[in-house]
Structure formats: structure tokens, C-alpha cells
Amino acid sequence: MRTAAIRATSLLLLLALWETAGRFWLDPLLLPPPSDVATRFRELSGTGELWTHVAASLGRVIVGYAVGSAIGIVLGCVIGAVPVMRDFFSLPIRFFRSVNPLALVPLMILWFGVGELSKVILIAYLVAIVVLYNTALGIETIPADRVRAGRCFGLKGIGLFVRVIVPAAAPGILTGLRLGVGFAVLVVIGAEMIGASEGVGYFILLGRQYVAIDDIFVGLLSLGAMGVLLNQVFLLVRDRLLRRYVRTTLYGS
Amino acid sequence: MLRLSAASKRFHDDGPWVLKDIELAIPEHSFFCLLGPSGCGKSTILNMIAGFEAANSGTVAHRDRPIIAPGPDRFVIFQEAGAALFSWLDVRQNIEFGMKAQGRRRAERDPVVDRYLSMVGLADHVGKFPDELSGGMKQRLQLARALALEPQVLLMDEPFGALDAITRRRLQRAVRDIWRETGSTVIFVTHDIEEAIFLGTHIAVMTAGPEATIKSQMPCRVSEPRDPSNPEFGSLYKSIEELMREEMGDE
Amino acid sequence: MFPPSVSGRVTRQILSVVVLIALWQLVSWLTGDRALVPPVQDLLAKLLDMMASLELPTHALDSLRRVLVAFAFGASGGMILGFAASAVRPLWTFLEVPLDFIRSVPPIGFVPLAIAWFGIGEFSKYLVIAYLTVIVVAFGTVAGVRQVDQTRIRAARCMGLSGWRLFRHIVIPSASRGIIGSLHLSLGLSFISLVAVEIIGSTSGLGFVIMDSRLLLQTDRMIVSIVAIGVLGIVTVLVFDLLLRLMGLARFMR
Ligand SMILES: Nc1ncnc2c1ncn2[C@@H]1O[C@H](COP(=O)(O)OP(=O)(O)OP(=O)(O)O)[C@@H](O)[C@H]1O
Ligand SMILES: [Mg+2]
């Protein structure tokens, strides 16, 4: 309760400070005060311009993320469950994981053009790598007795896999999926700054070209809101629908 | 009858023999306690009976059929219940799991689940998840989950090792009552001599590894009450302790 | 049934590299465009080329300098902020929400703002790379301090420690695990921010080379630089961990 009060006051104070700084001390063109940013936000959302960009970014993220996580989960399961595959893929995965995600943006655009394809492939690829890695890790770290218990029930092969191994690896899969959200947002903005004609990243870069700092602020705030929103949706799904899969029963009660 | 004949086991092609020529005959409906120094291979024997590990030579057979894979006729109660239970299923679903996997219908499952729920005293906790149970409750859930499949053989690997003395004693009683009621065969690994005498109808003592074998095998026919106040209990305890001491050496 | 032998494992790992390279060569051959998907021999030739002309080392050093300078300032700032905020609780309550929001914006978003405010010089680059480190390390420090066991503090009190000595001998070592974890994480993140600042508005560094190759359609040069920045990142983090170990801080790492 007290914490909430301090937080609310802190935000108000921060806004007030920013407002006075922008209005009286610094050039409002360089540091547009919150009221200006709010006005600009209303203008941009009124004409629908902002929403076009937000929708473009979100659409790319969602499509790329869906494709990437599906591929990542399937491949991760296969790699995690088959020891031979695990050995085989350990070096390639380590290599691909260490490639800097933003460095791939220009390459993907060079290969697949400035259209939607390059962005979706890029997001899907990055999400797939991180989901795949964490899924395989999740399977590898299942306690041996849990799998053995499943076999005591007479399960083997696909049945054992679906009923025991995948649910037991769920914490790892979910970790990968969560990290994937961050990568997807990061790289979509990068791709939109380098080669796109819409999207939040494009909008922010446009703001810089016209030295419209209030636009940059609107863009950054939408970007932050987008990140928070996606993360919250993820947590909501995890903690409401998938709560049973993130319980830990190892070590103590 | 569950029989191991000349069963030997090693984990690497040119490694040392962990178990050498194990001879064991475990009668139906017996409560068979396996005692032995740490690291001698008790868990390994249990894993061979469960079908998790194969013997390198010799045979392991249940009712004259060689054991080649795990199956619901032999169920293991693992020592670390937290690892063995399915954390994403609640108490009821954990018990139901095996019957569901066998494709049995709900009407058929429900009475069985209810029966074993109350047998292990978890009827008031059906909706809880394993992480919301105490150590003793987890172990009882494991027991109920196994019993629901009505296995002919229950394999227990030091199931109460991590529990406090009172819970432990309570669960020992529960296991004994359940064994009497269900008539299944129990193979129970422990290093606690008192526990073995309290529970067993048969007791086997192993030699220290490597190349461990069965040192001695005896029936346990101590009259009730099976506690240290009973002189029969005391004399059996002494003779087993003597056997164990020979194997432990100076330790 | 027997565990796969170690030699088989190494064989499979080597095999995977061979297969990967073969696949690459196949794709290169199938596309029929050496410029678009250069085969491995072209990439190696380009690598030697770029080493001989000193292009690669020069730009790599520029990139490394940016990361190291920004990380040094960011990490110190983050720790100071974290300890200060732990000592003065309301300060953290004040900062937590805005910092958390800023953290949720990908660093590349701030590049245009930093350029607009501070120009395309080195300062704006340092700033974009460092700010995330400040936040991540501050969060790590606060979490580390918060996790210090109360029993341990009481035990130390019983031994007569208080004030600065309590902080120096009990709080800092106990919080070290959280701090070191956040340092490790933010060093990795710094390389992502580095590429962000270098592909947008920079005239040096590996990120610049990548962008420059795109304009000139030099895929080989681009791929060599992409791999180079990956290697630079791994090696830097490895060296950092090694340094911590040499400084006797290994016991605070997991
Ligand atoms: N997977 C394995 N690989 C290699 N050696 C193993 C493996 N499992 C067990 N061993 C070895 O086999 C021997 C017997 O182990 P086991 O776990 O059966 O002993 P135990 O009698 O159950 O001991 P404890 O009473 O401590 O549980 C030990 O020497 C152990 O090192
Ligand atoms: Mg054992």
C-alpha cells in the first residue's frame, strides 16, 4: 500500500520534473514535455497513423513468433530426447546461439529482400533457436526417476513422450518461449529501421530524420508498451492456463 | 515367484562386476527386505527387477517370464518422491494417470481412485498438487498411485529414508497393512535393520561390493509385537547386525 | 542400452561441423550465385583479405573499445545505484517502475534518440550501450542485497560488526552472486546494443562493416563480420569470467 503510494508519487514527480525541464530549462524541441508528447500521441492515434505502425510490427512479431516457436519446440524435443542428436547438434546450436541477432538483420534483408518475408524469417529463426535450446535443455534435465515412473506405468515411445517427457520439460520450454518474446521485439525494430516502410521501428527512425523528437518519444512509449503487453500476455497464459506445468517438486516441499 | 539366477551386472564393458552371480528366489505374497552396505548394488538389483537395467549374464524372471522392460505388473516406489511424482498433475490425477494410460474409462477409474485415496489417507487432499504436500504425503501419494494399478510386485528403494522418525513409523505401518490387504509381493530395500525386521517376512543380506552377492537369506518369523521389547526381535537383530558388521569391515 | 562412448560423441560433434559446412556448400552451389551465398573457400579468402588489410582488426578493436568503455562505466554506475537504492529504500521504490519500463524497450529503439540528442559521436554510442548495463546491474545488485540472509547479518552483529564493516564483509560478499550474474548477463547484452548503435549511424566498428557490405552487396564481407562479432562476444565474456576467476571470485559464480 505504502509502496504503491510512493510509486504513484514517484511517477507524478518524474512527469512533473520532465515537464518543467522540457518547458523551462531545455529546448522543448529537444526534450518535448509530456504534455506535448501526449498531444502528439493523440494526433497520431487519431489519424490512425500510429496504429498502422503498431499493427505492422505486432503482425510480424506474431507470425514470426508462432512459426519459430513451433519449429523450436518440435526440433528441441527431438534433439533433447535422442542422445545421438544431442551430441550432433550441440556444436551447431552453440554456434547459432552466439550469433548476434541484430547483426543478422542486414544479411536477411540482402537474402530475402525488404518485404515481409525477411522479417518473418528473421524473427522465426531467432525464436526457434532460443526455444529449441531451452526445450532440449528442459528435456535433458528431467529427473531420471520421473521418466522411470512413467515407464513403470507401461508407457514407452510416443506415449511416454507425450504424457510424461513433454509436460515434465514444460518449464524449459516456457523459459525459451519467454526469451523468444524479447528477441522478437528487438529484432523486428532493427529490421524496420534498416529496411521497411511501416512499423514502429520505421516510425522512430523517421522521427530522427525529421528531428521530430516528440515522434520518437511516442514511438518509444508504444515500443515499451508493446513489450510490456506481450510479456504480460505471456505471463497471464503461463500462470493461468499453464500454471500446473511450472510447479517444482524437486528438493523440499 | 520372482527369480534371479546367476545374474551379474557391470556398467561398462571392461568395468568391474558390480553384482556377481546373484541368486534370489522371492516367493509370491512375501515382504522381502534387502539389506546391505551402501554402494553394494541394492538399487541395481531393484532396477533389474523393474526392467530399467538388463543383467549382463544370468536371468531375471517374473513368473518364469524373463524381464526385459518395465511394466505395470512391477511398480517402483522411488526414494525421491518429488522427482518421481508428476508435478503438473494434482493428487487425484496422479493416481488416475496409470489407468488413463491404459485407456480405462472414467466410471471404472473413479472407485479405484477413491479406494486408494482413502487407503493412504489423502482423501481430503485430492485437489492439491505435489508441491503442496509434505514429504510423508508425497510418499503416500506415490504409494497410492502404484497401488491403483494393482501391481503384483511393489519395489521400494529406501522409500522412507528422508522422513522423520514418527512419519516413518506411521508409513511403515501403512505399508504393512496395505501389503496384507492387497496380497502383493513387496521387495523393500533398506539399510535399517529394525525396519527390515518390523516389516519383512524374508530378509536377505548382501556382501559389500564389488562383485557383491547375497551373503545370507533368512525368513523373518518374529511374533507380534515386532519391537525391541520382544526377545525374538532382539536376537534376530543381533545376528543380522553381526552379518552386516562383517561386511562393513572396520567402518 | 550402454551409454554412448565418449569417442563416438566426439566423432558426432566433428561430423556435425562437416555436415554443416557441406550443407552450406550445397546451398551455395544450388543458388548458383557465389556473390549471394559465398562458399566456404570464398569466405576464408575474404577473411585472410580483411586480416591482411587490417580492416577486420581495426574495426573489431573499435567495437571492443566501445563495449569495454561502456561496460566499465555502466557496471560501476549500476552497482553504485544498486547499493545506494538498497540503502535508501524509497529511492528504489521511486526508480523501480520507470527503470523497468525503460528496460522493456529494446536498446535499438534508443539509438535515434541518442543520435538526435548527442550527435553521432562516440558519446551517444557509449550511452546507448551503457544504459542497459546500468539498469540490469542495478536490478541485480538490489536483488542480491535483498537476498542476504538475515541470520547471517545477525550472526555478524553478534560478532560485533556494524556499519561499513558489516557492509564490506557480509553484505557485499553475500550479494556478489546476484551482482556477478547480472554483470555476466549485461556484458552479453552490451554486444547486442553495440551492433544496434553500429548498424545505425556509425562509420566504424564491425556493425558498420556489416551495413556497409549490405550497401555494396558484399555478402562475403558481411558474413565474415557477422561471425567475427559473434566470436568477439564469446571471447570477451570468456575472458571476463576468467578474470573473475583469477581474482578469486569464482566461488560467487554458480
Ligand atoms: N549408472 C551407473 N553407472 C556406473 N556405475 C553405477 C551406475 N549405477 C550404479 N553404479 C555403481 O554400482 C554400484 C552399486 O550401486 P547401487 O546404487 O546399486 O548401490 P546401493 O546398494 O543402492 O547403495 P545405497 O545404499 O547407497 O543406495 C556402485 O558402486 C555404483 O557406483
Ligand atoms: Mg541405492
Image: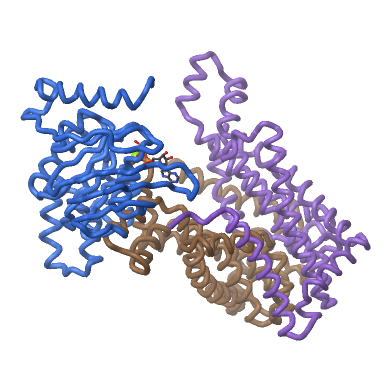
Identify the hue of chain A: brown
Q: In the picture, which quadrant includes the N terminus of chain C?
A: bottom left
- The C terminus of chain C lies in quadrant: top right
- Residue drawn where x is 13% and y is 25% of the image: B233
Q: Nearer the viewer, residue A163 or C60?
A: A163
Q: Is residue A203 left or right of residue A65?
A: right
According to the rendering, which colour does chain B have? Answer: blue
Q: Nearer the viewer, residue B136 or C188?
A: B136
Image location (x, y in percent) of residue A183? 60, 63
- Residue B231 versus residue C18: which sits nearer the camera? B231
Question: Visible in this render: residue B247?
Answer: yes
Q: Is residue B120 above or below residue B205?
A: below
Q: In the image, ligand 1 is in what quadrant?
A: top left
Which picture quadrant has residue B249?
A: top left
Q: Colour of chain C?
A: purple
Q: Where residue C140 sits: x, y (%)?
A: 58, 42
Q: Give residue A220's position: percent from left, percent from top.
A: 64, 63
Q: In the image, C171: left or right of C246?
A: left
